[in-house]
Amino acid sequence: MNAHDPNLLATSRSARLRQMLRSNELEFIMEAHNGLSARIVREAGFKGIWASGLAISAQFGVRDNNEASWTQVVDNLEFMADASDLPILLDGDTGYGNFNNVRRLVRKLEQRGIAGVCIEDKIFPKTNSFIGGEQQPLADIDEFCGKIKAGKDSQADDDFSIVARVEALIAGWGMEEALRRAEAYRQAGADAILIHSKLSKADEIVTFAREWAGRAPLVIVPTKYYSTPTDVFRKAGISLVIWANHLIRVAASSMQAVAREIHDSQTLVNVEDRIATVNEIFRLQDADEYSAAEKIYLTGGQAPSSAVVLAAGRGKGLEALTEDKPKIMLPVAGKPLLRWLVDGFKNQGINDITVVGGYKAEAIDAAGIKLVRNERHAATGELASLACAADSLETDTVVSYGDLMFRSYILRDLLETDAPFSVVVDSSESAPSNQSVRDFAWCSAADDRDLFGQKVLLRKISDTPAATDGEPHGRWIGLLNVRGEGRARLQKLLAELRQRPDFDSLDMPDLINALVEAGEKVEVRYVHGHWRGVNDLEDFRRAGDFAHTQTPYALGNNDGETAR
Ligand code: SPV
Ligand code: MG
């Protein structure tokens, strides 16, 4: 049975551990000492975890002598149980005190989803069995049986397991004493017996198992007799093998090697390719789950918007200034046009910003943005660029021209719209006549402040009004907001337009018009100035003026606040 078998996962952790102890198969559990290692044990395919006292104390940097308090151990177990859905068997040392401490321990372990505890018949505070074991005193049998009974009597879940660990062989008391104790512990209610040996051969264990003759499940820890073939354990009728300390040991040796290497070489270059990537650490922390949850729970249940900035062009009329950089990298009042835009998005909480570059894309400052390239920019229009950033439409997205500056409320108000599609249209009549990009907009109603709040829908955007169109109601400023279900519908339409032979010549207005023609309602947000498009030298000069109005406490020249 696989550890991730859904039937198995349907049963509780304690039931799964009990099943492993009782099954006729030889089962294995692996040491873990914190949340990360617990997850790694699960991913490796193990069905259970040994929360080793040695390893947990070692990762705290203390000795295996009950130097870490039992509550510190239990807190650590909570991280392990959260990081892995496997049953955890705690190495509970001597139970951290007398019968009463065991009772409380069992209740606390159950509360934290721990499947069972192993207690050993030594005296608190204990010492690791491999450090001078012969000199270690053993607990009085009756007193230890009382602890087992107290633990069993206090468990709320019938499946919670108490494993009694016999240290008689470690302490040099011999086989007969080991068997006598094991039988007493079985009769006291132990669910399994852990028989421990520090010999390099499994002889003691095999003899014990033969004499024991299956009276209760047997658990072993073959740390010292590691070279014994696993089949020997199987044939001896052992139920559960604990690989007790190998993850803390590999962690120590890897950390030692890497720390030494970095210290000696004063560079990371020798280790980078030999250690887990930062992304692998994120994966082990389940960072993806966080991202998915963020989309549901942050920003009032709505996924944070992203932005796509179309900036593949060189800029007509600006050739003299764009020899070595695209238009969006030209400075306006001391910072590149792109930065004005990026800062504007960030100020409204949009941090996922994809810029589609093309001409001299290598000169784009990619700090804080995702840069994608439209390699065919010289031969294509804006829609081909948008298609390069189609992945961004996974979340609500604002598509923007790259050569745009606007007052912050324009974006803020646009982001407040719930409509699947919305655009900003400037109804002011102050558009300068030398504009190369005009994007006239016709709408269902003119901008009428008496009708404030009433829905206005876009009819079409065009540079070249037909005689029958009548006066335009304003000009589209270059912002399209796509939300919710609109995203998939826009993707579908984009895919359809891609099939058209003239796709490479299509621009954003073609897409928006196609949306309208497909029956989509494209909501209009009217503004009255307060934005700038930068299309030629004259615009550029005015953009500088406009920028000053955006700079804190600068008494800017308001003649910049006209339309594109
Ligand atoms: C542990 O892992 O802490 C154990 C097993 O108790 S051993 O170290 O082998 O005693
Ligand atoms: Mg231990």
Image: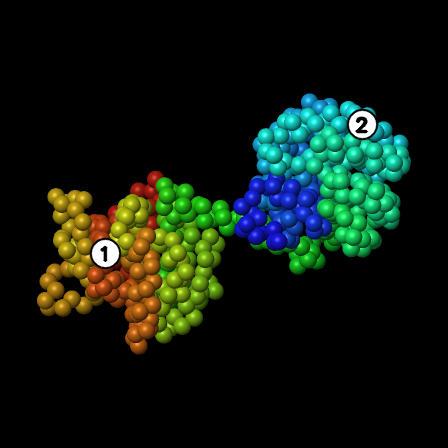
Would you say 27 lies left or right of 531 here?
A: right
Measured from the top left, where is residue 485 in percent x and y? 31, 55
Which residue is found at the position 56% from the left and 44% from the top?
A: 11
- Is the residue indicated by label 2 positioned so its CB lies within 8 Å of ligand 1? no
Measured from the top left, where is residue 531 in percent x and y? 27, 52
* In-front residue for pair 285/375: 285
* In-front residue for pair 68/186: 186
- Residue annotated with mark 1: 522
Between the residue at mark 1 and the residue at mark 2, the CA separation in whole angstroms equals 82 Å
Please state which amino acid type lies under the numbered disc 2: Ile
Would you say 229 lies left or right of 92 here?
A: right
**Residue 141's mark?**
2
Would you say 238 lies left or right of 173 here?
A: left
Quarter-wise, where is residue 242 in the image? top right
Q: Element type at marker 1? A: strand
**Labels 1 and 2: the sequence-earlier one:** 2
**Residue 377's mark?**
none
Quarter of the picture containing the C terminus is bottom left
Measured from the top left, where is residue 307 in percent x and y? 37, 54
Residue 555, above or below 154? below
Q: Mark 2 packing: few (<14 Cα in 10 Å), some, or many (20+)?
A: some
Would you say 262 lies left or right of 292 here?
A: right
Which residue is found at the position 41% from the left and 54% from the top?
A: 353
Residue 2, above or below 149? below
The answer to whether residue 339 is visible is no
Measured from the top left, where is residue 29 in percent x and y? 69, 47
The answer to whether residue 238 is visible is yes
- Direction bottom: furthest residue: 501
Q: Element type at marker 2? A: helix
* In-front residue for pair 308/518: 518
